[in-house]
Amino acid sequence: MGSVCHGHTQVTGKDHQVKRKAILIGLGRIGWSLEQDRLRYHPCTHAGSVLAHSGCELVAVCDTDPDQVQRFLRWWPGKPRVFLDSKDLFNAIRKADSDELKKNRFADLAIVATPQDVHTSQCIELLRLGIEDVLIEKPPGETRADMNRLEKAMSSSHSRLWINFERRYHPGYRKVKQFLDSARFGQVRSVRGRVYSGASPLHPGSGPLLHDAVHWLDLMLWFFGDPMKMAGKLIRDKHGLERSSSLQFLYPGFVANLVTGARSRYFEFEMEIDFDQARIQCGNSGFKLWKAKRSKRYSGFQELQDQSFSVPEGNPWKEMYKTIVAAQRQPEKYHRQATIQGLDTVRLVHKAYKSL
């Protein structure tokens, strides 16, 4: 078991900047291991993002698999403290923070990247411990009750709760949001979405709607706000496991439609937004724009024609961590409403699972 690195100051020009001390719970795919995928942009995990940010120092990691911990330590350049049980980590935090002057806090940034069946409770415990910023993986829980518990813990704490919906920090999706806010292409007339996944549902309260489509739902809430009503159909197999769904979300003036499916041999994540004067397609396959122009085939008609859609360079993981780290000195960078909308994604999924 390593020891905490205490050299957490760096000089930036004439300023002395104290690095934020981070702990990472969970060294799985999104916690760390996907960083070894050569086809992805980097960083693409929490560990990679902490390593890439000069204002962060990883002081502790926690994972129940000792072999995975050792693989991580061979990759990580420093020597963080190691915990194989989150309870031991929480006790270490309590002990370090028991000093009334709190001059040597154990950490001020906690990242929870463990499976969803445990990370809600772990996140709540970190909020109760008063860690300044707590970042939880999506989905932040499985049920409406989980979200109510998280919201209550957040309201009772001085901590800032963040949810890893990193698409909000992607330059392409941010550009789409700017178009929506400016009404540059007129009013929204319809929204269509597809999320297909090869993931196998774990139990009747889980599936691609919860694991993958929550990202789509978060974009929907960010782009358009809360829907007035949700309807649709969810199809299950003989074991009660989710196979597909078709959901409709009613907004003033338009309907947003989302279709999801499990056990496909490909992954697809797409959203298409039709405006009065244009159509935007955004998703994992990229960003496309069509504008209404005079038809070359029919007199008196307009048709959609391809237009260029340039996306500024930028890594959403870097942008997310830049925002979280900066929130310590600039609290206005934290938007509580974004966190509430993140919790609402699970509330929508729970409602679909229980009522459709």
Image: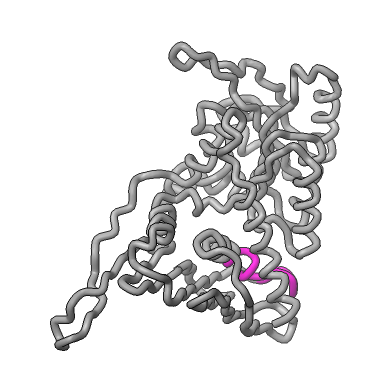
Q: Residue furthest top?
A: 14
Using the image as rendered, state which of residue 77 and residue 335 is in the foreground. 335
Relative to residue 204, is residue 296 drawn left or right?
Answer: left
Q: What residue sits 70% from the left and 66% below the top?
A: 347
Residue segment shown in magenta: 201-213
Majority SS type along the magenta span: loop
Using the image as rendered, state which of residue 308 and residue 26 is in the foreground. 308
Residue 41 among magenta residues: no
Q: What residue sits 53% from the left and 14% below the top?
A: 16
Q: How many marks?
A: 0
Q: Is residue 29 visible?
A: no
Using the image as rendered, state which of residue 155 and residue 320 is in the foreground. 155
Question: Residue 76, how many percent across, how many down?
Answer: 57, 32
Q: Quadrant of the N terminus?
A: top right
Question: Residue 28, how many percent across, how many down?
Answer: 63, 48
When the figure is inspected, residue 251 is found, relative to residue 167, above or below; the finding is: below
Relative to residue 115, is residue 184 drawn left or right?
Answer: left
When the figure is inspected, residue 266 is found, relative to residue 233, above or below; the finding is: above
Relative to residue 126, is residue 72 drawn left or right?
Answer: left
Relative to residue 287, is residue 234 drawn left or right?
Answer: right
Q: What residue sits 69% from the left and 30% below the top?
A: 108
Q: What residue sits 48% from the left and 41% below the top?
A: 319
When the figure is inspected, residue 42 is found, relative to residue 17, above or below; the finding is: below
Q: Quadrant of the C terminus?
A: bottom right
Image quadrant in which you'd find residue 104: top right
Image quadrant in which you'd find residue 111: top right
Question: Residue 25, how many percent across, how many down?
Answer: 70, 41
Question: Residue 4, how many percent across, how many down?
Answer: 70, 22
Q: Is residue 173 visible?
A: yes
Using the image as rendered, state which of residue 43 and residue 130 is in the foreground. 130
